[in-house]
Image: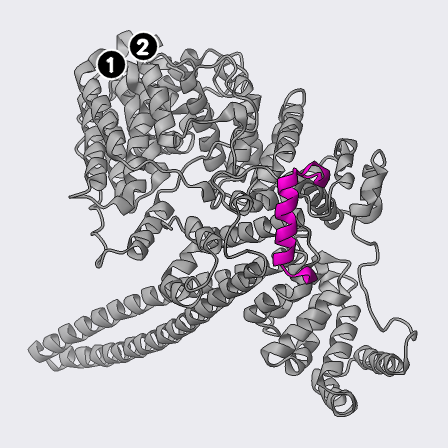
Amino acid sequence: MVVLLGDKCAEYGGQVDVEAHIETCSDILWRELEHSGDEILQLVIQCAEELPHKSTLYATLVGLLNLEDEEFGRKVVDTSHAKLQDALDSENCNKIRILMRFITVLMCSNVIPPSSVIEVFETLLSSATTTVDEERGNLAWQARADFYIFCILGCLPWGGLELAERVPDDLDRVMTEIEAYLSIRKHTFEPAFLPFETPADDNKDGGQDFLEDLWERIKLLSEDGWKVDSVPRPHLAFESRLVTGKSYEFRPVTCPEQPDQPSPISDVMIGRQRHEAELKYPQRIQRLHIFPISRTEENMKPIDRFVVEEYLLDIMLYLNGCRKQCAAYMASLPVTFRYEYLMAETIFSQLLLLPNPPFKGCYYALVIIDLCKALPGAFPTVVAGAVRSLFDRVNDLDLECQARLILWLSQHLSNFQFIWQWEEWLHVLDLPRWSPQRVFVQEVLQREVRLSYSEKIMQSIQKAPGLEELLPPKDGSCFKYGDQEGDHSEGVEFSLSKELNNLVKDKKTSREILSWVEENIIAVHGHNVSIDVVVQTLLHIGSKSFSHLCTVLERYGNVISKLGSGQSNEILVIEETSKIFQNNTQMAAIAIDRMMVYRIVSNLSIVTWVFSPSNVEQFHTSDRPWEILRNALDKTYNRISDLRKGVISAEKSVQKSIEAKVKAQADLDSAEALLEAADSEELQGQMAVKLKRLKAAVDRTKQEESSEQESLEAKDALLSRALSENEVLFITLYRCFSDALMKHLSVDLTEKQEDVLGPDHREQMSIDSEEHSAMDADDDERRNQRFSKSNGLDSQAEQQWCRCTLGQVRALTRKYATEIWPHIDKIDADVLTGDIHPSIVKAVYSALRRPV
């Protein structure tokens, strides 16, 4: 009953009266308080924390129980205080925010006096103001200060009316102090973290960041008398009773000490601290503005948008393990207006949140699928409208957001029989191969083939048959030794491949096969031919399925590893792998990924191969090279994360072994003292036996400590080595990006290039080359003369190539910023200096939130 409190009420689409439901629950719990008070206390607090969209209901319930049992009310207040203080100390943003809202609604139910709530507000205000003070503060930690202000403002829709009625002067003081804070804080605008490079014409925010936007909505709420239609106020039905209850002072809380200013002060040191602050206090939402405001905020006040967003985000956060219940709650919020457009926009805002969404993309896909089933008459149409709107603006969409959107859409359509109005996108066939819209449709279709099969996808696009040319070829494996056509040397290689295939069928060991390769291929035809024949043959044997591929690599991976020792040979192995799976991007990515796992090829070799000329040409027309690069970087990041966890675990084990040794030594010392004091032979004999056992225990704990210490040292060494390799990896990555981009970026930037490469104020590219003005044509001609004709790129394609490549620099830097910051000095010295193009530096620095 406590968990489902209010679920069947009219506000949530049911027929039960919410006040009656609360009173019934209160009566039942009151009778159980004497026997199960602690359990009820923990349950109510847990519900208030994990179902925060019903916090007003639980606060009213606590208020009614407080009338019957004052000790219960006191315990709720004390427990809430302890949890809030713990959340502040551990910097748990979600708990801080939710608990502050809970104590605010407890104030509405007269369980906490308003003066205590104001005191908590002012404590957080004081910490925030000190942080952004130029003389006493640390501006690098503005993220925490902004979060504290956000928490205060976020409480006012739930308790502003009561505060205004009961302590108006205190509330005015808090509002004045918040306004003063906003006047001295640094306005945050980071184009590298915006999903769209240019806002839609009807959705411009006027340059406000999220905190400033919330402040404007709160001011309008204040002018409107603090009335919020989207916040249920069940305590009003019991107001005459609740005012007679006892209130309990909420003891003062303390905020963590602000970190010291970096010494020496430099943009690198400040940037590292700022990155740390952003990780601990991330922005909760970045509004995407898919639909016109007239739709998303139809029939609602400005503050209602914020409240509904909070409801939706809280439900997705706390019910992420209960997808059906999550969708049910999201579809039945206690509001009187329609919010399907706002709900879709909020979900997509989370899916495309930069630098990282709170959950994996598949979670948001499941939520959208369940909402389409829960609201079949409204939500599918809204989702389709969102897709069309995003597709229309895909030219301006961040590249990482494009990749997420492609993955989501292909997965979403796979759950609805791949049904879509593909004829609406048939026009992409008239666009250049590098056009973002054409690439988007191409990647969605290719992802769909991975989730199904070619014939099924062909059926789904029957009304737009021209799109067939964007599908991958049906023949997934391009085995070059499948027939004997060719010259004499190809015939010899065919024979060798056939013989190797027979050896594998005969289940020869990898040692036997390696000996055969050395005698029959390397000695006669050379090393490169051996790599060609072995890689092609073995991967062809494993090309039937993922499991076949893994089996082949597990059994004969060391054969490839021996032949491919050294970076140049590893690159040849990767190249042959790419060739045999040139028509199957998924198998190519899986094969190279597995090879990295089995240590056949290194991440450095993969990075170097990705920037080979044949791949560089695809940077703006295919996601294939980027997928392989992301997989390599993800594997490296995950390995370092695992090593860090291993070191932490080993440190805990060492600490436990030390404590065990100290305890054993103390027991031994105590036993020795008792033995010396023993006055009878019987007692001395007993103590001698005990002493022997305790000495053995001390020796054992010393050995365990030594073993754990050795394990810690070994894991520390592995982590140090991995971090050193990581530094080399990122230096190589940025150097490859720099070398590739410098061939396309001119030293003296033209105005057009500034528009294309700068993310702040970029004009949309013209797609039809015939619409170029005479000046544009002259610029194109000069640029074509300046750049190497071997690239085969016209001016527009070149601009798109540069945009995509620089976009990937930003995306990868943003994603792996935590791993990049420790090596930034070395990266600066080795790569981001000298003649490097300023656009490259700008892309890296903006993704690190570092001033250029």
Amino acid at dot 2: Gly
Q: Which residues are magenta?
A: 767-790
Quadrant containing the N terminus is: top left
Whether residue 11 is visible, yes or no, is: yes
Q: Which mark is residue 225?
A: 2
Q: Does residue 175 sit above or below 552 in this rendering?
A: above
Q: Residue at x 24, y 34 (%)?
A: 184
- Where residue 743 appears, as percent x and y from the top left, is 58, 61
Q: Is residue 365 left or right of residue 159?
A: right
Q: Does residue 103 sit above or below 833 in this rendering?
A: above
- Where residue 469 appears, as percent x and y from the top left, is 82, 46
Q: Which mark is residue 164?
A: 1
* Disc 2 to disc 1: CB gap under 8 Å: yes
Magenta stretch: helix, strand or loop mostly: helix
Say which quarter of the image contains residue 416. top right
Q: Residues within 10 Å of mark 2 (few under 14, many from 20)?
A: few
Question: Quick one: label 2 or label 1, which is nearer the N terminus?
Answer: 1
Count of marks overlaid on the render: 2
